[in-house]
Amino acid sequence: MHTVTLFDGTPLPVMGLGTWTMGGRSHPDPSQDARALQALAAAFAIGYTHIDTAEMYANGHAEELVGQALRGQDRRRFFLTTKVPYSVATRSYVRNGVVPYCQQHGIVVTAYSPVEEGRLRVKTALAEIAAQHGAAPYQIALAWLVNQPWVITIPMSHNPEHLQQNWDAATIALTPEQMARLDGLA
Ligand SMILES: NC(=O)c1ccc[n+]([C@@H]2O[C@H](COP(=O)([O-])OP(=O)(O)OC[C@H]3O[C@@H](n4cnc5c(N)ncnc54)[C@H](OP(=O)(O)O)[C@@H]3O)[C@@H](O)[C@H]2O)c1
């Protein structure tokens, strides 16, 4: 299998396995368990080691099935990727322990919908910190994410200006005081 080499030298297989609809769609559908487990076993036998999941797939059940399928396999050979709902305004994954757990164990967290699908409200703290940096408030919202250890993000935009702003946001270094102020926003 062709691989891309990550910066640390780790080879990541270019062909992964998606799991959307395995074990259900928006809700768990146990009648699909055997089918999903068979598919996962067949994939592992072929040589798939890169599995993409998302908590929303079958409301978490797809991830449970992947976990079940991985029992007995050499876990060190596998890449499991997933995504979590994380932004200045949305902290459920901090409250439920996922983000702290990943940060403590060196697991990269991908924050999707980092500007709340374009609906992130610009509160005073965000606006003031943006002014201090000569930046746009949404850039600060993105910088707040990527200034955290082990957190990356994937803002979507069709607008070239926004694309550039979002790209540049990765280089904005927030002070500990600014991070703490934004931590307190939710
Ligand atoms: N469950 C999942 O696995 C899951 C779910 C949702 C998303 N995702 C992934 O995560 C990606 C990002 O999440 P998302 O698309 O839901 O939400 P998002 O990135 O938070 O928001 C995208 C919206 O924000 C606007 N926007 C982006 N940058 C901006 C900026 N600098 N200033 C002003 N507006 C800006 C965009 O409009 P313009 O085009 O006008 O800039 C677009 O309408 C998705 O595209 C998808 O790849 C995964």
Image (cartoon, rainbow, N blue to C red):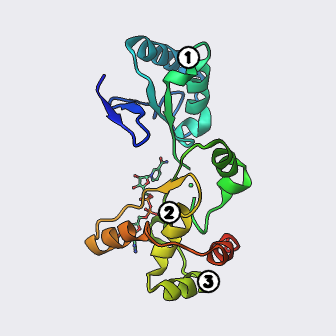
Q: Which percent across, then down, holds residue 177?
A: 67, 77
Which residue sits at x=37%, y=70%? 168
Query: Depth-wise, is mark 1 or mark 3 nearer the camera?
Result: 1
Name the foreground residue: 87 vs 144.
144
Ranked by sequence position, the earlier of labels 2 and 1 is 1
Graded by Cα atoms within 10 Å as few (under 14), some (14 to 19) or many (20 or more), the crowding at tag 1 reads few
Query: Depth-wise, is mark 2 or mark 1 nearer the camera?
Result: 1
> For ligand 1, which image quadrant applies?
bottom left
Quarter of the C terminus within the rendering: bottom right
- Label 1: which residue? 74
Q: Is residue 167 left or right of residue 71?
A: left
Q: Secondary structure at mark 3?
A: helix
Q: Which percent across, then down, holds residue 28?
A: 60, 32
- Label 3: which residue? 125
Q: Which percent across, then down, holds residue 112?
A: 49, 55
Query: Depth-wise, is mark 3 or mark 2 nearer the camera?
Result: 3
Q: Secondary structure at mark 1?
A: loop
Whole-number angstrom distance, CA of label 1 to CA of label 3: 47 Å
Which residue sits at x=39%, y=16%? 47
Q: Amino acid at mark 2?
A: Pro
| Label 2 CB-ligand 1 distance < 8 A | yes
As drawn, 45 above or below 84: above
Q: Amino acid at mark 1?
A: Asp
Q: Amino acid at mark 3?
A: Ala
Ranked by sequence position, the earlier of labels 3 and 2 is 2
Residue 114 disc label? 2
